[in-house]
Amino acid sequence: MSTLCGYGELARCRTSWTQNNPGRRFLGCPNFMDPTRNCNYFRWVDGPLPNRWYQATMFQQDANLVNAEAQIA
């Protein structure tokens, strides 16, 4: 089953890498980068993370990966 945003377009699944929700997947309007076409549709796909330690660990793992990739480039 597909989920449509407020504009009737297929909502896209993305992954959050914010400090409070690292690694959580969500559905969002495909036009989120265009303020004139963004309907602000948003829905979490995953449940909340189990605890603050898990959040901090996931966030740090992503930061380490981003830093390692930046050093290679």
Image: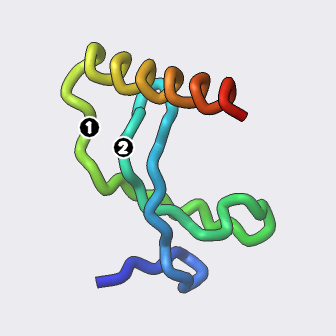
Q: Amino acid at mark 1?
A: Pro
In the image, what residue occupies the spot 27% across and 21% down? 54
| Circle 1/circle 2 CB separation < 8 Å | yes
What is the spatial separation of the Cα atoms under label 1 and label 2, in whole angstroms?
8 Å
Q: Quadrant of the N terminus?
A: bottom left
Residue 36 spot, x, y in % from top left: 80, 67
Residue 63 placement (x, y as % from top left): 52, 23
Whether residue 5 is situated above or below residue 68 in the rendered picture:
below
Q: Which residue is mark 1?
A: 48
Give the residue at x 44% y 19%. 60
Residue 24's tag is 2
Q: Quadrant of residue 24?
A: top left
Question: First in sequence: mark 1 or mark 2?
Answer: 2
Q: In the displayed structure, would residue 25 be above or below residue 12?
A: above
Q: Are there few (<14), some (14-19), or many (20+) residues within 10 Å of tag 2?
A: some
Q: In this rendering, is residue 14 above or below 6?
A: above
For the C terminus, the quadrant is top right
- Disc 2 secondary structure class: loop
Q: Is residue 54 above or below residue 12?
A: above
Q: Amino acid at mark 2?
A: Arg
Which sits in the foreground, 24 or 64?
Answer: 64
What residue is drawn where x is 40% and y is 33%?
21
